[in-house]
Image (spheres, grey):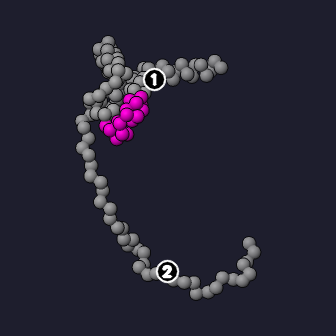
Amino acid sequence: MRQLTLRILTIACAIYLSGTHWLILQGTAWTKMLVERSQTMGISQAVKTTFDGEHPCAMCNSVSKGVKQESQQTGVLPKGAKLFEAMLLAPKVAALPMPVSTTFAYPFAPHLPALARADAPPTPPPLA
């Protein structure tokens, strides 16, 4: 029991020191926003409004304040918070067109119909 407690404590400390707790909290906020918004609007609209950065929830605002406050105190953003900041400040990604479907010609396959077997199977079947 003591080893389990020590492992959990070690993992919790590693998560906190790396700044990953901000990512976990932001992921929780996004999940909550998706669930709430998908009940009132379509799923595509819910995803769009959740991740556009223009419609933050109270938890998103708290996470942003916490990341800023932590970076002001230490002067350095932890790795997890840097990733979080990069995700929020990333430029809008252009929508890519759907790929055009093409037919694929197998270069080594003969273009002949399958040939029927010339000989009949053995009767009775051989025993293994």
Whole-percent x and y of residue 26? 38, 26
Estimate the spatial distance between the alpha carbons at disc 2 and disc 1, rounded to whole Å.
60 Å
Task: Answer with left or right where residue 48 lies relative to residue 21.
Answer: left
Amino acid at the residue labelled 2:
Ala
Q: Residue furthest top?
A: 73
**Tag of residue 15:** 1
33 drawn magenta:
yes
Task: Answer with left or right where residue 120 lies relative to residue 89.
Answer: right
Q: Compared to 95, does 105 lie above or below?
A: below
Q: Compared to 75, does 25 lie above or below?
A: below
**Which residue is label 2 attached to?**
114
Whole-percent x and y of residue 94? 24, 44
Q: Compared to 108, does 54 lie above or below?
A: above
Residue under the image location 32 percent in, 17 percent down: 65
Residue under the image location 34 percent in, 24 percent down: 57
Pointer 2 or 1: first along the chain: 1
* Badge 2 vs badge 1, beta-carbon distance below 8 Å: no
Amino acid at the residue labelled 1:
Ile
Classify the position of the C terminus by image quarter: bottom right
Residues in magenta, as a range:
31-48
Along the viewing direction, whichever of 106 and 114 lies nearer the viewer: 114
Q: Quadrant of residue 124?
A: bottom right
Q: Compared to 79, does 114 lie above or below?
A: below
Residue under the image location 48 percent in, 19 percent down: 13
Q: Quadrant of residue 105?
A: bottom left
Q: Residue furthest bottom?
A: 118
Whole-percent x and y of residue 100? 29, 60
- Mark 2, secondary structure of its residue: loop
Residue under the image location 37 percent in, 34 percent down: 40
